[in-house]
Image (tube, rainbow, N blue to C red):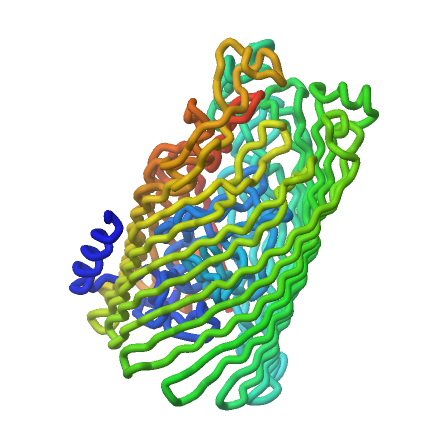
Amino acid sequence: MKFKTALWCGVSGLLYSAAPAYAQDAPAADAAPVTGDIIVTAQRRSERLQDVPLAITAVSPEAATQLGLRNMRDIQLAMPGTDFTAASGFLSLFIRGIGIQYSTPGLESPVAIYLDGAYIPRAGGVNSLLDLVDPGTIEVLRGPQGTLYGRNATGGVVRINSAAPTNKLEGRVLAEYGRFDHKQFDGMLNVPVSDTLAVRVAGRYKKEDGYVTNVDGTKLAAQNNYTVRGRFKWDPSDVFSLTGGVEWQRSKARNYNDALQFGAPTCFVCQSTGETPPGFYKAIQTDTGPYYNRMFRADLRASLELGDFDLSSTTTYFTNYSEQFADNDFVSSNRFIFAVPRNGGKSYSQEFQATSNLEGPFNYLFGVNYFFDKSFLDISLTGSDYDFAQTFAGSYPRNNANVTTQSVSAFVEGTYKVTDQVKVTLGGRYTYDERDLSVTNSTGFQLFGAPAAFTDSASFRAFTPRFVLAWDNGPMNLYYSFTRGFKAGGFSTPAPFPGNSINPEKVFNHEVGIKNSALGGKLRSSLALFYYKNKGLQQQIIDATGAGTRTENVGAAEGYGAELEINGDPMPGLVMGASFAYLHAKYDSYKGASQICFDPTGTSNVNTPGATLYPCSIDLSGTRVPHAPRLMASLNGSYTFDIGSWSANLAGVAQYRSRFLFWPGAGGPLGYDQEKGYVIANFSGFVSPPGEQIRLGFYLDNAFDKQYATNRTTGAPYGVNFNAAKPRTYGVRAEYRF
């Protein structure tokens, strides 16, 4: 009843509104902002953003530059209902409270990432995806996208497009220097090789000291990585086009910056050592070396225009490898090291699509997709607390899990124009998945009763329909949609023991939206009111046995809310925008939830006598889901003006988000795994002499120097830890374009 009331009130009130969605305009970066249209391909065909009947935010490269949005963390500050962050070397994406903290082989994230059309199945170690190197348009689709994007899109889809080659000679060189000895060098060169062939090469080198100081003086959260990308576009005729590219990423960084949040009695080892937390941006860790990652991807798209319909073929390849060793007792003694000697895999996909261009009222698209992935996760538990395994079994506990995935799907969608202003869209996708798990355990893990080796397999089927009814009279686009999402089942890894098959997660979503354009397109708005229910919810929890995290089916969750975006050009040179999101997302049913309880006597933890934190079960039905702040609000603005013959720009973006949880139930009765509400603000600017070829600028991130965490975790038996987010950072940059 609450949702129906909110839905009716919101629709009634919005029919009289005229406010815009952020970044629906595409202002020129080198002149006073003007309002235009962003062309997106969210529905697998080129359309104006205003005409797309779904909740989507799109950011053009010009708008990102003008607003000082340098990476995905910046962009999400100007988006409603999203939480994009990285902790301990893992990229975490949440949309409307649906997401996963650590994506592992066998169970991917419910927010699907597509990079130049390539599905990215693993986010571990691919944090450089958060940085935008020579980007094109960035599209974030909120809500389940099971029909057009298929499996693992119950929360939404993030589409990151690289800048496409153009038919003119151009280039760009950028250098940055900032706090924590931040050094960054970007380069781009676009060359029209001939009238039909263009090549574009871009790269980035980035290195900076960490902002968290370990007791031994080591800087944690440090970066040292580079990216090189090459793309081409070949148009040998008016009807045939071939585009593609390759990209390499390498990283050698100390991403693991977990620090002790509390001393004794919750800190188990602190009871004997007496150590206490050294400070918010300090840590007590045994030096375990840097985090290493490498990634390579390639994509090739062939397009053929045949008049009444277009044919396309998209082929992608992705591989990554990473390794990490982390001190998980959070004190100077070498008690517990959680090691990941190997993590990664290889994947391949092939898709064929036919899209009609009929002049009548009916148009359609049809496609088939094949996806293959072979991934692995190798973990080891070492340190003095596990020396007994080395003594009695000859090895530390080590688990190696290999998961092979094959997915085949077919999708079709048709749109019929009932009138010039009313159209109906109906579509669906059928998906069939097979997963095979192969596990080996060292003799050290066999001490705990784990078998030496085992295999398992599972298959899953799903049909994900989509229905949209839209009324578009030009200035206003009002729509209702019903969509269904499907997150593939699989296996929770690490997997020391058999019997961990996870069932699929299915989401249905009702959404009413309205997009409005006024004042000749200078004022735009986008409002979405939604209700979803998530059945068979796959929930990730902390594994109290020491094997990292574990995913389990926990019942159901539901959410409803509203998302409003506005953008406008109130005067020449000034672009302003705002967004607001309300989200009520809770577990409908979650009985027997795995939690970490506290016993000051240290007698309840039978596995580790004396430890005050121990695993327990609590009914979390009716409680809030993680990463689902009740309120989010943001403001952004950019002002371009003249200083004599020079031009200048000042930009800023600020966001407030209310209290939210990192883990179910905030980790347990102690409630430590949550973050209070906070405001983050970033500012930037530049000046440019006549000709606009040179820019001299600055950036100021987290301007108010807010101390907040990107993750807080209560784990048994060692204690409560957290990852500090970056403090205030600032720097200067110089850019040359030709």
Answer with the quarter of the image where residue 414 lies: bottom left
Does residue 315 appear left or right of residue 598 in this picture?
right
- Spot occupied by residue 710 in the image (x, y as percentages of width and height): 47, 37
**Is residue 246 at all visible to an observer of this figure?**
no
- Spot occupied by residue 333 in the image (x, y as percentages of width and height): 65, 18
Q: Is residue 214 above or below residue 317?
A: above
Nearest the viewer among 147 and 569 is 147
Give the number of callouts. Answer: 0
Nearest the viewer among 110 and 68 is 110
Q: In this view, does 697 lie above or below 354?
A: above
**Residue located at (81% from left, 19% from top):** 391
Does residue 597 appear left or right of residue 690 in this picture?
right
Residue that protrudes farthest toward the right in the picture: 394
Nearest the viewer among 336 and 620 is 620
**Residue located at (37% from left, 50% from top):** 81
Q: Is residue 731 above or below residue 722?
A: below
Does residue 391 appear left or right of residue 110 in this picture?
right
- Spot occupied by residue 154 in the image (x, y as percentages of width and height): 47, 55
**Is residue 158 at all visible to an observer of this figure?**
yes
Does residue 702 appear left or right of residue 385 in this picture?
left
Q: Is residue 409 above or below residue 701?
A: below
Answer with the quarter of the image where residue 607 lies: top right
Answer with the quarter of the image where residue 406 lies: bottom right
Nearest the viewer among 574 and 670 is 670
**Residue located at (61% from left, 42% from top):** 492
